[in-house]
């Protein structure tokens, strides 16, 4: 069960993550930063970055989730492997599979499958070994998974430098115009609902490019490229401009043509950590998404 901690700040100018690590000596600074990123910590009831400079009298509230198992266990879960070498895997994740263990999903995740497939994986992290970027549970498509610490650091640096190409196929409600565009709007935790994201002034920079592929009845099929990697970025940005992803019950509404959000990670491009060679991989649209398009064409 989660437990709640409250602090009234007694000095000014110190960073939020450093202050909490000092006041809560049983929590490491890296764990505090993860709690902040996952939305478990607020300052004066609002989301905050770890770098926020505190003022005397600020109220910090921290919800500490219950501890999970010390390390995930290998589980024989089918994997669609697109590419593999000594440093990494590129997998085609099916919709419905959670990426890593978390409260409510302690097992049967992509991480458990990776541990069963890669018996010699050498990653220092415990709960998210090899994970350098994520896809939502109900998003299908391509993901990179590192097999050792050096590869994980190399790939993480490429993502931070925005040199990894991540492209998606997305179906939205309505006819989106113009046919090419860029959505720039900061994303952070929704102050009214900490479990979801929103476009908020104090959020982190986020940038999404889109290109219309086809108009179909009252829908638009898009190719979307993300320049940043914020949580739920595509879903939040498209909803914010009035064109929610079809089937997205969190940021849009339930769909009659598909049981999950129409979002597929179709293309990845990056440099191999060992050689520096630039490679690209593609994934065909998942079967349920293909069937949804066929249904629209019959309308």
Image (cartoon, helix red, strand yellow):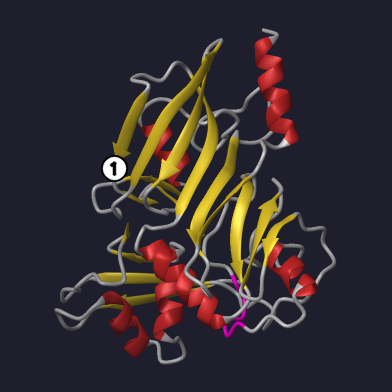
Give the farthest residue toward the bottom: 25
- Residue 21 coordinates in the image, percent (x, y): 36, 86
Instruction: Tell me the quadrant of the picture where the N terminus can be found.
Output: bottom right
Residue 176 to residue 128: above or below: above
Q: Residues within 10 Å of mark 1 (few under 14, many from 20)?
A: some
Would you identify the image quadrant in which residue 131 lies?
Answer: bottom right
Q: Is residue 223 visible?
A: yes
The answer to whether residue 282 is magenta is no
Closest to the observer: 12 or 117?
117
Q: Residue at x 71, y 68 (%)?
A: 106
Q: How many marks?
A: 1
Q: Main secondary structure of the magenta part?
A: loop
Residue drawn at x 56%, y 34% as measured from the top left: 248
The range drawn in magenta is: 123-130
Observer able to see residue 35: no
* Residue at 56%, 10% in the rendered image: 217
In the structure shown, which secondary structural element does the residue marked by tag 1 occupy? Answer: loop
Give the left or right position of residue 258, taking residue 228 as reference. Answer: right
Above or below, 154 relative to 230: below
Q: Is residue 165 left or right of residue 87?
A: left
**Residue 127 part of the magenta segment:** yes
Closer-to-camera residue (10/231): 231
According to the image, label 1 marks what residue? Answer: 185
Q: Is residue 52 left or right of residue 187?
A: left
Q: Nearer the viewer, residue 159 or 236?
A: 159
Q: Position of residue 176 (x, y in %)?
A: 41, 20
* Residue 204, horizontal then vertical, whole percent: 30, 55
Left or right placement of residue 28 versus residue 147 in this view: left
Q: Quadrant of the C terminus?
A: top right
Q: Position of residue 5 (x, y in %)?
A: 42, 76
Q: Looking at this view, is 56 or 30 the one in front?
A: 30
The residue positioned 60% from the left and 56% from the top of the image is 143
């Amino acid at each position: 069960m989660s437990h709640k901690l409250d602090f009234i700040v007694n000095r000014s100018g110190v960073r939020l993550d450093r202050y909490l690590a000092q006041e809560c000596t049983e929590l490491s600074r890296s764990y505090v930063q993860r709690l902040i990123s996952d939305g478990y910590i607020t300052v004066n009831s609002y989301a905050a970055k770890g770098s926020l400079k505190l003022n005397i009298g600020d109220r910090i509230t921290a919800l500490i989730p219950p501890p999970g198992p010390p390390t995930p266990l290998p589980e024989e879960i089918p994997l669609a492997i697109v590419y593999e070498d000594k440093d990494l895997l590129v997998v085609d994740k099916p919709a419905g599979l959670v990426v890593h263990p978390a409260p409510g999903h302690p097992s049967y995740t992509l991480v458990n499958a990776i541990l069963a497939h890669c018996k010699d994986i050498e990653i220092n992290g415990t709960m998210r070994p090899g994970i350098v970027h994520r896809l939502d549970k109900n998003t299908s498509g391509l993901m990179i998974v590192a097999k050792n610490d050096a590869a994980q650091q190399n790939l993480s640096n490429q993502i931070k430098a925005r040199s990894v190409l991540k492209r998606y196929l997305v179906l939205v409600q309505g006819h989106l115009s113009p046919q090419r565009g860029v959505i720039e709007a900061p994303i952070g935790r929704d102050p009214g609902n900490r479990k979801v994201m929103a476009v908020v002034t104090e959020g982190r920079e986020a940038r999404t490019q889109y290109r219309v592929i086809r108009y179909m009845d009252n829908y638009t099929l898009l190719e979307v490229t993300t320049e940043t990697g914020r949580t739920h970025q595509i879903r939040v940005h498209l909803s914010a401009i009035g064109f929610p992803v079809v089937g997205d019950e969190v940021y849009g509404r339930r769909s009659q043509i598909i049981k999950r959000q129409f979002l597929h990670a179709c293309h990845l491009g990056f440099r191999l950590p060992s050689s520096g060679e630039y490679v690209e991989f593609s994934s065909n649209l998942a079967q349920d998404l293909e069937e949804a398009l066929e249904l629209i064409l019959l309308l």
